[in-house]
Amino acid sequence: MSDTHHDGERRRLLKAMAATGLLAGLEGLLPAYARAGSGAERHLAGAARVAGGKPRSVTKDFHIRREGIGIAGGYAPSAITVNHSIPGPLLELWEGHEARLRVHNHLDESTSIHWHGILLPFQMDGVPGVAFPGIKPGDSFEARFPVRQHGTYWYHSHTGFQEQIGQTGPMVIHPAEPDPIKADRDYVVMLNDWTFEDPARVLAQLKKMSGYYNFSKRTMEDLVEDVARSGWAKTLKDREAWGGMRMNPRGIADVTGHTYSYLINGLHPEANWTGLFTPGERIRLRVINGSAMSYFNVRIPGLAMSVVSTDGQAVEPVETDEFQIGVAETYDIIVEPRENKAYTLMAESMDRSGYACGTLAPRMGMTAAVPELRAQPQRTLVDMGMGRGMMTMGPDKKKGQRLEGDSVALKEAAGPVVAEHGPDHHGAGNATIAKKQRDRLGERGTGLEDVPHRVLTYSQLRNIEPISDKREPTHTVEVHLTGNMSSYMWSFDGVEYSDSKVIDFPYGERVRLIMVNDTMMEHPIHLHGMFMELENGQGEYLPKKHTISVRSGSRVSLLVTAAEPGRWAFHCHFLYHIERGMFRVVRVSNLPGVDDNA
Amino acid sequence: MLKQSWMMTLLLSAGIAGIAQADSHGKASLDSVVPEGPIEPSSGAPLGWKAKPTKDDEIYAFSMIDRLEYGDSEEGQTYLWDAQGWIGNDYNKFWWETEGEGPVGDGAIEASQFEANYAHKIWPFFNLQGGVRYDTNPNPDRGFLMVGLEGLAPYWFVTDMEAYLSEDGDLSASAEFEYNLLLTQRLVLMPRIGIKASAQDEPDYDLGNGITSTEMGLRLRYEIRREFAPYIGVRWNQMYGETKDIAEEMGKSTSTTSFVAGLRVWY
């Protein structure tokens, strides 16, 4: 109850401060923890620190409101808060106990909360029109279920654009057994993209002019540079290849830092979220990408990171220096700073139009240098599902030289071709196909190909325990990720949700889910209700994912045991792609005849 | 079955509901997956639920004044408008277009046309259009049926090709191509070419068989916002063949070069 009291205080104070213009200055001066002590900031500090405690069943109330809030150095008059906070409060649950999560809708519109990555009865899953009818204004809904997993997760609205304007929050489930991941400090690092625009307008702008937010297109200057570097012939060949496809190689993100501020635990870089440590401690950072549209590159210059978990599932520790996190994914990392100094936690948006950052420090008020944004990345013809090693031009000269027409070098840079596309081009809603489909799980994420340090790849992820279902799949479903950027259309197999039919998984069977990305951008694909085991060459130790970032021009294969009866949403987790129909329902049932779909 | 419909009622009434459907292992029962009664095919959920997980069939609308421009040439000062817009979903849209011009000062419209059509996305980058056009100036009003192909051609050429059948049975065609050359992220040089042709002599409208006229332009705009871009440029209008001869006989200019300044705005 004291939570609510303090939340209320914080809101009132923020409102008053915003009204007098004090907020930007104050937030800019003081990191969250420095302000701890007054009721107003207590919540921010508490939101990041995982409290833990005695295992117990949890009953928690989530009050969804539309209200003004100070955020990202400004004031948002009509944000959606959970318990007066953005992001919402940290939800801590205990495996083997019960969760009673009560959502109260104080909005004048319908709402919902989806418990992202959680195994539960599908009726509790929080997807309006699929799992339940939604929560009407003034109504409440209780999701009550036994907790049968542990790890780092999150929650968010599954209704309209509510997620974009605040309705997200972190979730940590403590294991029933002693946690094999030992840490002295345990922080949540929740990444969000924030816009002061009406998100419905953002989508409308994309619909009218898909490049609306892209201010890093290739210009005359790039042409001059490319000609100077590679000569007219190669430059024209490159322009011919992209122009012929009517594709923009600088199409990295649909929505960019032009409108987005990037936040860590609700704080923009100037507000500098700070996690304290004592040198020599093991710090666990639970990185959650709760963004609507933004991938991030996460690194802590000067510190090696040990990746110990993804999507709540423990993996064999992988030591690395940087990782890319897709929308809706989570990665837990361990860092062990030994020096008595500050480190910058850098989360650069994949298109490098902005960043979120915070600080790990022994004391409040310390800062370290914030690295410059690196040169914007560029798509390659591998992304386009092209077969030949054509040149890749861009600000990164090394990359251009390496890939340029050199098929041997290309093999090293890009994964092997594993399949070719069939004759179906998926109709007018799909602009390109992945003619040559590659296994790209061993590749670094977009823009990280040539950074001079270690970068996590999907093929490095190895589950800590062997998979429990060792049966050969008896049912295969192949889904193509399709779209047409110029008309801002997104779909599966060229068909939008409204025109689609349910995808049936026969109950109890082992299903192989194959995804081919025919588009020129990566898509974070999320399956509700069941984990997908990523066939990444780790034998019986396949990593389990609730959300998988599928690279452009790639083909991925995942194994799912259809053990959870229900109607489960299956969709791209880019919010504006959901709203364009890149969405399906996977139905796990014992309906007769389902097997015929195989 | 009775139990299930009771539970559905509970869910629909959507107060505190739901746990009744979970079995002791925290999973839903198989019986609860496929509801009784009519089913919505995309979701497998009851047809009666109004909520949808996505609004992918949303209607959008777009209006753009491509050119609202003032021109200055040896023949005098002119104004010109060229606007278009659409409303619809991904595959089916209602399009409208209008353009016209006249001399600055006396206010008379020298030429104007209005077009309304239905556009269907047939290829990833192209719409097939069918509709009507109505010209009000300078000659007697007349209507047309039109078919068109509008879209983005390879190498980023914004393309609009249309064929017309007038109420008098005359066939004609027009084609427009634009290209956006980014000098910087906001400074854009746009070459534009428009060609008009007629399949027969149209003496009442001072048009001859063949290519009747071209309009070429080069405009430099600055996108203060994406939606708001003033520009300056040059426009060259040229008549050809018999159309040119007719114009010469009438003492009209057949080749005009204008310096232009204008505004490109959209919403």
Image (cartoon, coloured by chain):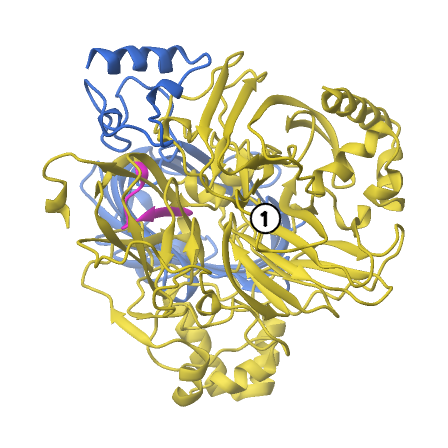
Residue B72 lies, in percent from the top left, at 62, 52
The residue positioned 64% from the left and 57% from the top of the image is B186
In this image, B48 relative to A290: left or right?
left
What tint does the image give chain A? yellow
In this image, A201 relative to A42: left or right?
left
Foreground: A346 or B118?
A: A346
Relative to A516, is A268 above or below? above
Foreground: B48 or A5?
A: A5
* Quadrant in which residue B93 is drawn: top left
In this image, A540 relative to A46: left or right?
left
* Residue A489 colored in magenta in the image: yes
Relative to A3, is A443 above or below? below
- Kindly identify which residue carries mark 1: A288
Circle 1: residue type: Ile
What tint does the image give chain B? blue
In this image, A582 relative to B104: left or right?
left
| Total labels drawn | 1
Q: In the rendered image, is residue B160 in sight?
A: no
Residue B65 lies, in percent from the top left, at 52, 41
Q: Which residues are magenta?
A: A488-497
The residue positioned 85% from the left and 35% from the top of the image is A23
Residue A465 lies, in percent from the top left, at 42, 59
